[in-house]
């Protein structure tokens, strides 16, 4: 068995200066609908971390993941958003930036920017794949000139039909694991930032798969000088329990990203995975059954919450980079027009993720286990597969009031839109037959969501977003209003604070 490895402290440079012509990619001031961080008492800072990192060989039936003899130099960027005035009990959410479009996608910030600000926590976003580093250099060749993942970056220009999962020749995706660990070492050193109460690794979708891979193979392997774990907990989102290879050796340069199914690790840190209805279509394959892919990942320190009716991703988040910024990075812009919004599934998974954030901090600090795993129901005629209702939606799991008291039929995924899903609004006459007013409708939904909050699958801040989406759907069905252009998240829904530090 491989003994633990001491992770070195990287060299940090920053905060990097910001000017009108030089600023971070995905800065809050250049998002679709910019968030004024200063208004909330927050600052945004960018650092570059550099050092050398080990490569690792995949586990075999007879041996765990182990380091190779190869060390490669790297420089990556870290984007932080934190309170301007340090708080004594702040959690640092270390987000693995998603690479599924070939640039840094802030999926965790998109899911929970309002929650992080409401809690007074710190958000730490790490560029974690060579193709994203390449986009940074295209975006600003001077600012990001030093960024490297073991080799020269080609500075790609995406065209329709390109493969954002392609491997960058000469670079090495397998540096990610020690880069993430070295980032944690830096955060725990207190050299540039106030020490957080705990570090929680987070990631959504492909980055959730990275989170699963790290906790499975590197939580016990990569340690600080005292032999302590570098992360206190893990929050993988919309990735089930899937993992990936720990290196790119032997990968076809043009290959698509291929998740793996491994036995869920049981470690000494809390894990809460949150899986969407849409994931069960997006990640299904011809080798494994639904039950193998999704109805797993529980244990003394593990929870797996399935959320019914919700899609894999939310493309109308206000904090997605403006298309001009994406084009400047050499990548393809997003289309979020009126026709797209009209059929978009707006049932939010974000309130359940907010509850998972609250629960994992309580688990870390106070030893309070999170609410039990909630899985989709398996088909009684074929327990290897998941059951569906007449509309093709999964049964079981965490079911929000908007799903149980519907104004629309929500599809987590469908053939035309496997990532964002779709909805069909119910007729106005049918809705008004059931509910005489919006207040009546909200009361009906609250009866469901009150029970979920009491059980630990919702919390007050996320309830604010639920109420805002309920209002939006009511106005669309009853008054013929247009869909909102952005998800109605708000950092001021309700204060969130767990005040007792470890």
Image: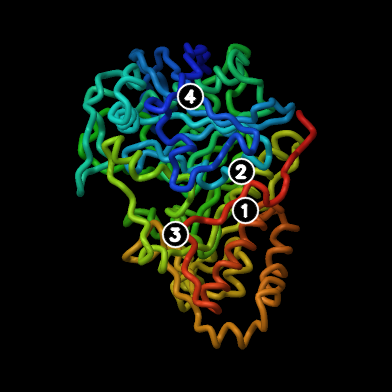
Q: Earlier in the sequence, mark 2 or mark 3?
A: 3
In terms of secondary structure, where does tag 1 sit?
loop
The residue tagged 2 is 302
Mark 4: few/some/many CA within 10 Å (<14, 14-19, 20+): many
Seen from the viewer's position, the closer of residues 106 and 1 is 106
Coordinates of residue 429 in the picture (x, y in percent) = 55, 88
Q: Depth-wise, is mark 1 or mark 3 nearer the camera?
A: 3
Q: Depth-wise, is mark 4 or mark 1 nearer the camera?
A: 4
Q: Which mark is residue 46?
A: 4
The residue tagged 1 is 373
Quadrant in which the C terminus is drawn: top right
In terms of secondary structure, where does tag 3 sit?
loop
Most extreme residue toward the front is: 20
Q: Please indicate whether residue 86 sits to the left or right of residue 204 in the image.
A: right
Q: Residue at x 68, y 64 (%)?
A: 449
Q: Residue at x 76, y 30 (%)?
A: 501
Coordinates of residue 116 in the picture (x, y in percent) = 62, 40
Seen from the viewer's position, the closer of residues 387 and 274 is 274
Estimate the spatial distance between the alpha carbons at disc 2 and disc 1, rounded to whole Å. 8 Å
Q: Are marks 1 and 3 in contact (CB under 8 Å)?
A: no
Q: Earlier in the sequence, mark 2 or mark 4?
A: 4
Estimate the spatial distance between the alpha carbons at disc 1 and disc 3, rounded to whole Å. 18 Å
In terms of secondary structure, where does tag 4 sit?
strand
Q: Depth-wise, is mark 2 or mark 4 nearer the camera?
A: 4
The residue tagged 3 is 278
Q: Earlier in the sequence, mark 1 or mark 3?
A: 3
Estimate the spatial distance between the alpha carbons at disc 2 and disc 4, rounded to whole Å. 33 Å
Q: Please indicate whether residue 121 sits to the left or right of residue 166 in the image.
A: right
């Amino acid at each position: 068995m491989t003994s633990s490895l001491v992770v070195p402290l990287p060299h940090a440079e920053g905060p990097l200066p910001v000017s009108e012509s030089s600023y971070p990619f995905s800065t809050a001031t250049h998002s679709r609908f910019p968030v004024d961080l200063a208004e909330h008492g927050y600052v945004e800072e960018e650092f570059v971390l550099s050092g050398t990192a080990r490569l690792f060989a995949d586990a075999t039936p007879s041996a765990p993941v182990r380091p190779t003899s190869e060390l490669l130099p790297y420089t990556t960027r870290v984007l932080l958003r934190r309170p301007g005035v340090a708080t004594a009990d702040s959690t640092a959410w270390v987000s693995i930036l998603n690479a599924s479009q070939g640039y840094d996608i802030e999926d965790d910030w998109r899911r929970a920017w309002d929650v992080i600000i409401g809690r007074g926590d710190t958000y730490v976003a790490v560029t974690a794949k060579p193709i994203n580093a390449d986009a940074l250099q295209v975006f600003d060749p001077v600012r990001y000139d030093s960024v490297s993942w073991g080799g020269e970056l080609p500075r790609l220009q995406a065209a329709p039909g390109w493969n954002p999962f392609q491997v960058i020749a000469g670079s090495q995706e397998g540096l990610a694991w020690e880069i993430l660990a070295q980032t944690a070492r830096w955060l725990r050193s207190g050299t540039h930032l106030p020490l957080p109460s705990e570090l929680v690794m987070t990631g959504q979708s492909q980055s959730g798969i990275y989170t699963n891979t790290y906790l499975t193979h590197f939580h016990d392997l990569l340690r600080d000088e005292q032999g302590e774990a570098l992360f206190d907990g893990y929050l993988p989102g919309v990735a089930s329990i899937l993992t990936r290879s720990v290196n790119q050796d032997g990968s076809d340069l043009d290959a698509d990203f291929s998740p793996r199914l491994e036995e869920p690790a049981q470690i000494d840190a809390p894990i809460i995975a949150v899986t969407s209805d849409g994931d069960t279509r997006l990640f299904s394959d011809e080798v494994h059954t639904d039950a193998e892919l999704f109805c797993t990942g529980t244990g003394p320190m593990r929870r797996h919450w399935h959320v019914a009716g919700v899609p894999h991703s939310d493309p109308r988040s206000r904090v997605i980079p403006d298309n001009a910024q994406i084009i400047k990075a050499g990548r393809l812009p997003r289309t979020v027009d009126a026709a797209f919004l009209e059929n978009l599934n707006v049932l939010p998974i974000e309130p359940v993720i907010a509850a998972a954030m609250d629960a994992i901090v309580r688990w870390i600090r106070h030893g309070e286990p999170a609410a039990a795993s909630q899985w989709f129901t398996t088909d009684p005629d074929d327990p290897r597969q998941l059951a569906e209702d007449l509309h093709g939606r999964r049964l079981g799991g965490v079911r929000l009031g908007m799903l149980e008291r519907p104004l629309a039929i929500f599809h987590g995924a469908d053939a035309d839109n496997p990532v964002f899903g779709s909805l069909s609004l119910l007729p106005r006459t049918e809705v008004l037959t059931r509910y005489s007013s919006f207040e009546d409708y909200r009361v009906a939904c609250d009866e469901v969501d009150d029970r979920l909050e009491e059980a630990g699958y919702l919390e007050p801040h996320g309830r604010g977003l639920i109420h805002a989406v309920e209002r939006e759907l009511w106005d669309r069905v009853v008054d013929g209003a247009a869909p909102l252009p952005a998800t109605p998240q708000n950092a001021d829904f309700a204060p969130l604070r767990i005040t007792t530090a470890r």
